[in-house]
Image (spheres, rainbow, N blue to C red):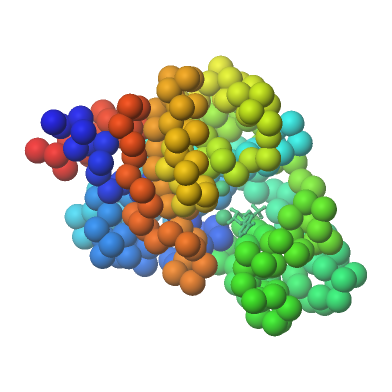
Amino acid sequence: MAADRIARLNIDLHCHSTVSDGTLAPQELIERAHRNGVELLALTDHDELGGLAAATARAAALGLPFVCGVEVSVTWGGETIHIVGLKVDPANAELVRGLASTREGRDGRAREIAAQLEAVGIPEAYEGALKYVGNPQLVSRSHFARYIVETGKCANVSAVFTRYLIEGKPGYVAHRWAQLSDAVRWIVQAGGLAVMAHPGRYRLSDQTRDQLIREFVDAGGRGIEVISGSHAPGMERDYLAVAQRFGLLASRGSDFHGPNESRHDLGAVGRLPGGVLPVWHDWPEVQCLVQ
Ligand code: AMP
Ligand code: MN
Ligand code: MN
Ligand code: MN
């Protein structure tokens, strides 16, 4: 049956390039997705649209179905929440402006992170992180993590986060990102679908998480990642139930950042389960894949 085939497609709607904190250029990401057998890809850089033109062109040349995306950083109830926008118009002025304002504080924050790291014996971390940055407007904790691995203080990026970069650790700097309702509005008025990214990563009680999702839906949010490379095994059951309870469309994404860093390669996560509508169920790009 076509609906079942649509749900089981190898569609990856979440990944990062060097325009944010990924390690592959947009073109290389497209080539890798194509090699991996991904049937449709979205590039979703953090707070940035700058990789979409190159990705769109390379995808067209290879015949890989592609949609434009973004992952917006949001602060809600003191927590950082990520909202993915799919099928956004990268030329939309309000979206472009909103993302520029969201990026604005990053450089100052990076300098503060570096000062705090210096106090615990890691000097010149700002300059060190910059060596890994592909876009000066998008210095992220991932770039610091790569530099700290280079210094030999930690064996891998994930160990750096645990030791230095998460809340309560010496290199953590609290930051205010966009508001939830603004992020959803920017996406929707740019023609996109707003999707709650990796819901299993937020440290929220079930009750607070439900409140977050209710506010997200009230703001115009339409989907949730049921399958995410950032989730622990087994979480898809929980978020399938959440999607059903809130009437949300289900999304799937690897959250791939690079070959040496990510547990899950492009397209290499579980398929969407039955019992929920895929976010791509009515996309024209998908109809030709199942004919
Ligand atoms: P930033 O937007 O600068 O706060 O950086 C957030 C990024 O750091 C996320 O998008 C992930 O790529 C990465 N990240 C966050 N937490 C972890 C973690 N525990 N282990 C590895 N990477 C992480
Ligand atoms: Mn990231
Ligand atoms: Mn994220
Ligand atoms: Mn991501």
User: How far across and down, in percent of the image, does residue 34 sit?
Assistant: 26, 60
Q: Residue at x 82, y 68 (%)?
A: 117
| Residue drawn 25% across the image and 44% down it | 9
Quadrant into which the C terminus falls: top left
Image point (45%, 39%), residue name: 236
Residue 109 screen position, x and y as percent: 77, 55
Q: Nearer the viewer, residue 151 or 208?
A: 208
Kindly give the residue lying farthest to the left in the view shown.
Answer: 291
Q: Nearer the viewer, residue 3 or 70?
A: 3
Q: Is residue 142 visible?
A: yes
Q: How many badges with numbers are in the image?
A: 0
- In this rendering, position of residue 156 left or right of residue 229: right
Task: Specify the quadrant of the image occupied by residue 86.
Answer: top left
Image vertical order of residue 259 relative to residue 55, above or below: below
Return the x and y of residue 116 as percentages of the image width and height.
86, 64
Q: Quadrant of residue 100?
A: top right
State the residue in front, 265 or 101.
265
In the image, farthest residue toward the right: 119
Q: Position of residue 92 (x, y in %)?
A: 46, 36
Q: Which residue shows up at 39% across the image and 28% down it?
A: 249
Q: Is residue 271 above or below residue 261?
A: above
Identify whether 255 is placed above or below 212.
Answer: below
Q: Is residue 242 left or right of residue 135?
A: left
Quadrant containing ligand 2 = bottom right
Asked where in the image residue 213 lies, by quadrant, the reply is top right
Residue found at the very far top of the displayed protein: 218
Is 174 positioned to the left or the right of 17 in the image? right
Quarter of the figure with the N terminus = top left
Residue 60 in view, yes or no: no
